[in-house]
Amino acid sequence: MSHITTLQVQMRDEQAIRAACQETGAEFLGRGVHTLFGSQTVEGVGFKLSQWRYPLVATEDALKYDTFCSKAGAGGQLNQFRQSYAKQVVLAQARRKGQHVTEQRQADGSIRLVVHAR
């Protein structure tokens, strides 16, 4: 039986953030206090996308970031990171349950994950 799910992603899993950084080439900054535009500080898990001037910070309730002085295409880079993060969460949960996941890249750049019971 097939089920299609659309995820609204809240980034709370530090290991999944680290794995998404490795997959997308983002810089993992780790847990701590990170400085955004205007010296605003945010505490959480930070990472930096190559087209962004300031880090993005995952807190317990939101992803905080500032797009000031980001390069063109920065929004697409964030979408790619979110997709990678969601995939990493699914992969980790499937592994814990002893399931296998296959990934199918779609023509529009999105991915389709299929979870198989063993």
Image (cartoon, grey):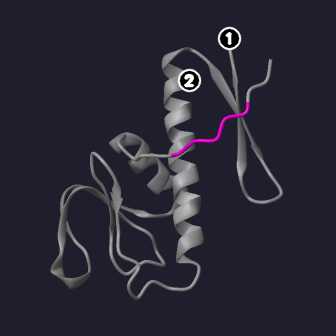
Q: Alpha carbon of mark 2 to alpha carbon of mark 1: how far?
A: 10 Å
Give the dominant element type of the magenta stretch: helix, strand or loop: loop
Q: Is residue 57 left or right of residue 78?
A: left
Q: Is residue 100 left or right of residue 96?
A: right
What range of the chain is rendered magenta? Answer: 4-8
Quadrant of the rendered structure where residue 36 is? bottom left
| Image coords of residue 14 (percent x, y) | 33, 44
Q: Which residue is mark 2?
A: 94
Dot 2 alpha-carbon crowd within 10 angstroms: few under 14, some 14 to 19, many 20 or more: some
Q: Does residue 117 sit above or below 47 in this rendering?
A: above
- Which of the pair 1/109 is nearer the observer? 1
**Mark 2 or 1 closer to N-term?**
2
Q: Is residue 101 magenta?
A: no
Q: Which residue is mark 1?
A: 118
| Image coords of residue 86 (percent x, y) | 53, 43
In the displayed image of the protein, which residue is found farthest to the right? 107
- State the count of labels: 2
Identify residue type, mark 2: Ala
For label 1, the SS is loop
| Image coords of residue 32 (percent x, y) | 17, 57
For label 2, the SS is helix
Identify residue type, mark 1: Arg
Residue drawn 58% across the image and 42% down it: 7
Residue drawn 20% across the image and 63% down it: 42
